[in-house]
Amino acid sequence: MLKFYYNAAPNPMKVALLLEELGLPYEPVPVDTRKGEQFSAGYLKVNPNGKVPAIVDGDVRVFDSNAILLYLADRERRFVPLDPGSAERGNLLSWLMFVASGVGPFSGQSVHFRHAAPEPKEYALNRYDFEAHRHWKLVEDHLAKSHYMLGKEYSIVDMAFWGWARLLPYVLGTGEATWAAYPQVKRLLDEINARPAVARADALKTRHAFKTENDDEAKRFMFPQNERLKK
Ligand SMILES: N[C@@H](CCC(=O)N[C@@H](CS)C(=O)NCC(=O)O)C(=O)O
């Protein structure tokens, strides 16, 4: 059975949503990143990047959330335009990579510098906050003209969007006021949240007890770069 290595963070949750949308049988394997399980020798064989998510599907190993979305959607021929030379496929690749290389990393860094980094952080926070807003404004303007990220059809790009959009108030540090500035993002987020697959994906994390304390051990694993500052 397909093994899904995960925790409840945005990148694994995108994949959980697709697995549930597809109704595929899978075995969820928790990777407790606050306990450093992402760096165990066994897991590094699955994902040499030491991050979640990853899947093992028979002889096939895939790591990186957006690669997994594309792999599973192509394999199942669902939630994805398939014709390689088509405008629709071009659109899919563009928006999927835009989420993978822009929305995700800039949102993630915005979270880090806003909520975790030590002072002084004004320069870095300003840069990542600016870039997070710039990416989300692009999504907002796009969704004003397009019901889903790829037009009329719900696709893996919407699932990639959902993973981060649900955290937007935290990402931008603007709480509920966020939604007045991003009404189209909220519209699509609400629509996706109402899908039964979301409830099933969210229920997954209740099956495993992940470490919740953000103590020194967790910080050492999550922010290993800080060890260099101690020398
Ligand atoms: N580009 C990767 C990023 C994966 C990633 O950063 N995962 C986070 C959770 S959302 C993680 O594993 N963090 C633990 C760590 O950095 O040690 C993807 O999209 O899968």
Image: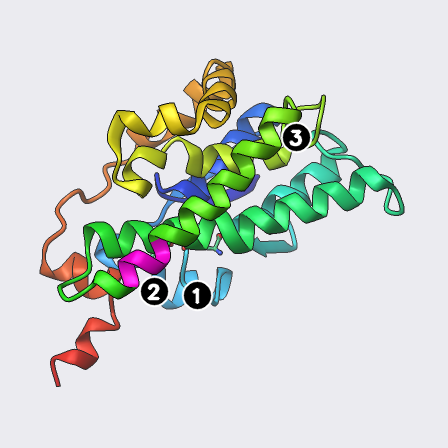
**In the rendered view of the protein, which quadrant contains the C terminus?**
bottom left
- Distance Cα–Cα, label 3 vs label 2: 34 Å
Residue at label 2?
A: 40
Q: In the image, is 62 to the left or to the right of 88? A: left
Q: Amino acid at mark 1?
A: Leu
- The residue lying toward the viewer, choosing from 136 and 196, is 136
- The residue lying toward the viewer, choosing from 98 and 146, is 146
Q: Is residue 127 magenta?
A: yes
- Distance Cα–Cα, label 1 vs label 2: 6 Å
Find the magenta span and give its range: 124-128
The reply to whether the C-beta atoms of the residues labelled 1 and 2 are less than 8 Å apart is yes
Q: In the image, is 182 to the left or to the right of 151? A: left
Majority secondary structure in the magenta region: helix
Residue at label 1?
A: 44
Dot 3 or dot 2: first in sequence order is 2
SS for dot 3: loop
SS for dot 1: helix
Q: Residue at x 29, y 26 (%)?
A: 177
**In the rendered view of the protein, which quadrant contains the N terminus?**
top right
Q: Quadrant of ligand 1?
A: bottom left
